[in-house]
């Protein structure tokens, strides 16, 4: 039997999957890449994305509760479709990979890698809430997975926050696991205050890829981001710290400082498991900065320019079209990525909006892929100057 408190915590999310009503305005998810050419429902309205914080805590709380109480507008039309061999109880065996049996591996290896299945993944996880309603550990894993799917695949910040907070009620340790992501949701929903209330609990960034540093920089707190990144570097992880510092400076348009930090990554000696990859990322970013430093779009002839950079899985090619001294389109034309989430739509859109790579923020949870789009774009534009 569930305790009274746990039953109350579970009741609301279970109801959320059965309520039929309109999705909250401004919080609906972006359609996944490929949705318009697949057998998925029509593209929903894009979510409300802020260029800076503008909502009170009460307004953000209302958005989160409203989103959690209603399904996305495409939910009812999405079929419940999954392999009959799939175990929905999260009873996975360490060291054993079988995406047709274990749901965590199915979400990672099948749903995440196939945009046409993203909506089916949401439907399946809501079904798992019912299947696991008497199993708190499995229920919390399901809620956590819903948070990640809404955050990573749909940029639906309100629903992601709703489900991550539900997971924390059932299993409090999830508050530590999802801290940076939940803070990111609050920032995207418009409350820097709520994001800082989480980040302030973490004076050090011990995440694998500098998640706290990235968010401080995204919020415009570059000094805090750099102090945290340098602390990481001093405490045995120079590749992680200096790479995060370089990315923070690049986002702020401080290219010379960014280049200096990337050079420090290249000189770093550490036992970090990601050292080789981090050095490769620093080298690619350094090349992109050098290409972008002297860029003048007014001097780029009309035409299409293509260049490549290393993504997570291999080379990634971007083609940029320039007309009348303006970037009119950015397209990923070749890649080997699998879990790229919204990096192929969000990052090119930012580059067009900002007319270059200054101030373009890498997509959270697809940072390496997003960086590759940014770097290849800088190289492509530089070709137009030659």
Image (cartoon, helix red, strand yellow):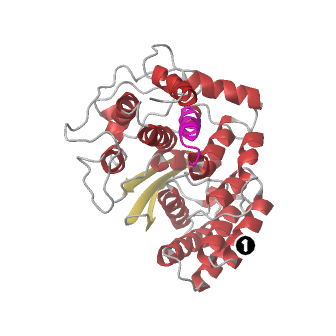
Start and end of the magenta stretch? 159-173
User: Where the N terminus falls, by quadrant?
Assistant: top left
- Residue 367 vs residue 206, the one in the foreground: 206
Image check: 373 left or right of 220? left
- Residue at 33% x, 40% y is 89
From the image, tell me which residue sits under label 1: 230
Would you place residue 103 above or below residue 244 in this image? above
Residue 228 position in % (x across, y down): 73, 66
**Image quadrant containing the C terminus:** bottom right
Instruction: Return the residue nearer the eye: 65 or 281.
Output: 65
Q: Quadrant of residue 129?
A: top left
Look at the image and say whether residue 141 sits in the magenta stretch: no
Q: Main secondary structure of the magenta part?
A: helix
Residue 187 is drawn in which quadrant? top right
Q: Is residue 195 left or right of residue 288?
A: right
> Residue 215: in sight, yes or no?
yes
* Residue 316 falls left or right of residue 241: left
**Residue 294 seen in the current view:** no
Please tell me how crowded label 1 is: few (under 14), some (14-19), or many (20+) other residues with Cα within 10 Å.
many
Outermost residue, top direction? 21
Which x, y percent locates residue 21? 49, 13
Residue ID at (62%, 36%): 49
Image location (x, y in percent) of residue 253: 71, 61
Give whichever of 333, 62 is nearer the camera: 62
Residue 288: image quadrant is bottom right
Q: Compared to 273, does 350 lie above or below? A: above
Q: Is residue 279 above or below residue 216?
A: below
Residue situated furthest right in the rendering: 223
Residue 236, horizontal then vertical, whole percent: 64, 79
């Amino acid at each position: 039997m569930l305790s009274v408190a746990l039953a109350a915590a579970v009741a609301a999310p279970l109801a959320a999957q059965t309520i039929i009503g309109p999705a909250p305005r401004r919080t609906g998810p972006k359609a996944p890449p490929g949705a318009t050419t697949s057998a998925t429902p029509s593209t929903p309205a894009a979510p409300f994305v802020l260029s800076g914080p503008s909502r009170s805590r009460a307004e953000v709380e209302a958005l989160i509760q409203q989103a959690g109480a209603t399904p996305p507008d495409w939910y009812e039309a999405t079929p419940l479709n999954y392999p009959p061999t799939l175990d929905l109880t999260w009873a996975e065996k360490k060291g054993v990979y079988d995406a047709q049996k274990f749901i965590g591996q199915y979400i990672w290896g099948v749903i995440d890698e196939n945009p046409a299945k993203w909506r089916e993944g949401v439907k399946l996880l809501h079904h798992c809430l019912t299947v696991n309603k008497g199993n708190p550990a499995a229920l919390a894993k399901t809620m956590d997975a819903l948070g990640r799917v809404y955050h990573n695949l749909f940029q639906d910040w309100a629903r992601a926050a709703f489900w991550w907070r539900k997971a924390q009620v059932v299993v409090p340790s999830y508050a530590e696991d999802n801290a940076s992501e939940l803070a990111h949701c609050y920032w995207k929903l418009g409350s820097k205050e709520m994001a800082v209330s989480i980040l302030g609990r973490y004076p050090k960034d011990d995440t694998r890829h500098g998640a706290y540093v990235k968010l401080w920089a995204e919020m415009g707190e570059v000094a805090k981001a750099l102090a945290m990144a340098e602390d990481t570097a001093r405490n045995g992880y120079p590749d992680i710290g200096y790479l995060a510092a370089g990315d923070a400076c690049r986002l702020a348009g401080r290219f010379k400082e960014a280049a200096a930090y990337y050079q420090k990554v290249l000189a770093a000696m550490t036992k970090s498991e990601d050292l080789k990859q981090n050095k490769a990322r620093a080298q690619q970013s350094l090349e992109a900065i050098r290409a972008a430093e002297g860029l003048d779009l007014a001097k780029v002839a009309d035409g299409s320019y293509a260049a490549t950079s290393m993504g997570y899985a291999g080379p990634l090619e971007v083609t940029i079209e320039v007309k009348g001294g303006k970037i009119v389109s950015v397209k990923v034309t070749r890649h080997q990525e699998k879990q790229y989430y919204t990096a192929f739509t969000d990052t090119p859109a930012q580059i067009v909006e900002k007319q270059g790579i200054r101030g373009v923020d890498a997509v959270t949870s697809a940072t390496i892929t997003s960086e590759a789009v940014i770097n290849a774009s800088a190289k492509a534009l530089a070709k137009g100057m030659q």
